[in-house]
Amino acid sequence: MAKEAMQYVYIPELDKEGKRARLTLLTDKDSRGGLSSSVQTEFESPDGGTSFLLCGDFRKIVLRTSSLRGTQKALDNHHATAFTPDSIETLKAETLAFYAAEAKRFA
């Protein structure tokens, strides 16, 4: 059975209240068939637990493909296509911009 592809990218600029900010990059089988790659901001506490606001933290579908089978090779290739070094840097910039806009909104 194929296992999801996942990696973490830390964003120290967003650390708060002793929690480390990170982007979770995930590729898995899509509920509608095919494969889906998404990114979500989470905050990791010192004890290893994570938290996020379901509708309040940065989240985005990066790539969805309906024609691929959910084999491990397909998941890994889809993940590598969705999350190149350049796209990860773009996602980090989008995340920082998202939280900067949120800070202005609530200031």
Image (cartoon, rainbow, N blue to C red):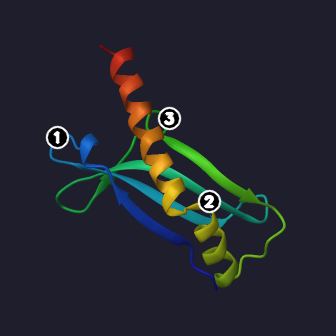
Location of residue 31 in the rendering, given as x and y in whole percent from the top left corner: 72, 59
56 and 5: which one is in front?
5
Which label was assigned to residue 17? Answer: 1
Q: CA distance from mark 1 to mark 3?
A: 20 Å
Which residue lies at the image location 39% right of the left edge and 24% below the top edge? 102
Q: Quadrant of the C terminus?
A: top left
* Residue pointed to by mark 2: 37
- Of the image marks 1 and 3, the number of the one nearer the N terminus: 1
In the image: residue 96, left or right of residue 77:
left
Foreground mark, 2 or 1, reads 2
Location of residue 23 in the rendering, given as x and y in whole percent from the top left corner: 41, 53
Location of residue 2 in the rendering, given as x and y in whole percent from the top left corner: 63, 82
Q: CA distance from mark 3 to mark 2?
A: 18 Å
Q: SS at mark 3?
A: loop
- Of the image marks 3 and 2, the number of the one nearer the N terminus: 2
* Residue pointed to by mark 3: 55
Neighbor class of circle 3 (other Cα within 10 Å; few <14, some 14-19, many 20+) is: few
Determine whether label 2 and label 1 are within 8 Å by CB. Answer: no
Which residue lies at the image location 25% right of the left edge and 48% below the top edge? 12
Q: Image height check: is 79 above or below 71?
A: above
Location of residue 40 in the rendering, given as x and y in whole percent from the top left corner: 47, 49
Q: SS at mark 2?
A: strand
Amino acid carrying label 1: it is Glu
